[in-house]
Image (cartoon, rainbow, N blue to C red):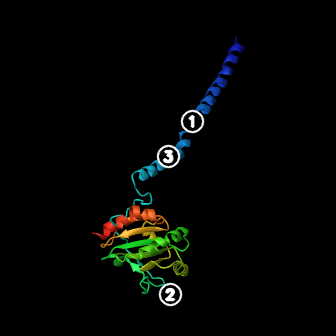
Amino acid sequence: MSETKKSSESSEPSSQNTDQSDTKKGGFNVFILLPLVIFMGLASLFLWQMANGADPNQIPSVLINKPAPQFDLPALDASFGIKRPDGGSMPGFKTADFVGKVSVVNVWASWCPTCRDEHPMLLNMTQDDRFELIGLAYKDEPANSARFLSNHGNPFDSVGMDISGRVGIDWGVYGAPETFIVDKTGTIRYKHIGALTPRSLAASFMPKLEEILAE
């Protein structure tokens, strides 16, 4: 009897281990689905924006309806020979320059291929003298910025050289290109992420600009 009892007892751990192993095999790690859930959430948000006519390039910013940050950016050196669209000398720009006129601030760089794609949109905007078109050369070398404008045309009334990218950080810039609308009080009213296109100009950017110009 003792041998039978010992045999029975020795078999119990084996059965327990089997049960635990089966439980582990049958378990499901919910974290495996987490990336899919996040993707589906972002996709749903994008589709909702499109269905409601929202511009997916208009990303909320903590600076909207707040004064532009304090800064003073140097001009592109006059020795490069880049002139304003009206033929005048090219100045830099600072916070105080916003007061009294509506400004469109375009964040761009010579190293940015998308900036080259949107450049014709900016050149077309030079025909409208109701606002200042300002270029913020983001993390770019002056010689490269000048070469870009010389090759593709200069739409800007002023260009500020943000070589370190410090001012771009203060503006909450994600990267180039980005475009802001600043009203006559120096308040940032609108932000567009990515290249301006005929579609985004017609659907959202220009209507917002017209609204601000009419104030």
Residue 81 image label? 2
Tell me which numbered mark, 2 or 3, is placed earlier along the sequence: 3
Residue 29 x/y as whole percent:
56, 38
Residue at the image position 51 percent from the left and 48 percent from the top: 39
Is 28 positioned to the left or the right of 49 in the image?
Answer: right
Compared to 125, does 46 lie above or below?
above
Instruction: Tell me which label, 3 or 1, sits earlier in the chain.
Output: 1
Label 2 CA crowd tier, 10 Å (few <14, some 14–19, many 20+) = few
Nearest to the observer: residue 53 or residue 19: 53
Secondary structure under tag 2 reads loop
Instruction: Indicate the quadrant containing the N terminus: top left, top right, bottom left or bottom right.
Output: top right
Residue bearing mark 1: 28
Give the percent coordinates (x, y) of residue 28.
57, 35
- Can residue 152 be seen in the rendering of this structure? yes
Residue found at the very far left of the displayed protein: 215
Quarter of the image where one finds residue 17: top right
Picture residue at 53% right of the left edge, 47% below the top? 35
Front residue of this view, candidates 187 and 129: 129
Say what amino acid the circle numbered 1 marks. Phe
Q: Amino acid at mark 2?
A: Gly
Q: Secondary structure at mark 3?
A: helix
